[in-house]
Amino acid sequence: MIEGVLIKKLKVIPDERGRLMEMLRCDDEVFEKFGQVYMTTAYPGVVKGWHYHKIQDDNMVIVKGMMKIVLYDAREGSKTYGQINEFFLGEHNPCLLHIPKGVLHGFKCISQTEAICINVPTEKYNYENPDEYRVDPHSGKIPYDWTRKDG
């Protein structure tokens, strides 16, 4: 596992009225502080990435569909420099994924319908000076192939 990345298995509590799932609590190991909460989605087969932050950590939960979330540790000096982690998260595997600053990340919708991600970053979005740095997902600058691996 990439240094600083944490995964929290989430518990779904169903009853005859519906279901409840806590995602992030202030007493969780991964909680540092609250910046904002936002939703992002991806349509089937779409890749969104790579990007990273210099200031904020992300706390992602996929609440609808399934996504493959891929992390790449480009932090020089990290014990896990150069490592790649893949996570398959969503309705069939409800987890919170904590992504520390400096770790490049992207995701691909692997379900047949739109996938929905809720993110609770540690910082609010700064419209004048966004903490958002991007790398083209198909540039080859990161040693990862987004195509489906059959077989």
Image (spheres, rainbow, N blue to C red):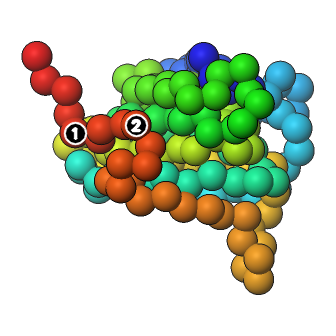
Image position of 62 with respect to 132: above or below: above
- Image coordinates of residue 27 in percent, x first then y, are 88, 26
Q: Secondary structure at mark 2?
A: loop
Residue type of the residue flagged with mark 2: Pro
Q: Can you tell which quarter of the image residue 48 is in? A: bottom left
Q: Which residue is under mark 2?
A: 143
What label does residue 147 carry, if any?
1
* Badge 1 density bin: few <14, some 14–19, many ≥20, Cα 10 Å: few
Q: Indicate the quadrant containing the N terminus: top left, top right, bottom left or bottom right.
A: top right
> Taking 71 as reference, is 27 left or right?
right
| Viewer-nearest residue: 51 or 89 | 51
Observer-nearest of 83 and 53? 83
**Residue at figure coordinates x 70%, y 54% from the top left:** 53
Dot 2: within a 10 Å radius of its alpha carbon, few (fewer than 14), some, or many (20 or more) residues?
few
Quadrant in the picture for residue 124: bottom right
Q: Looking at the image, which residue is at 10% across and 16% down?
A: 151
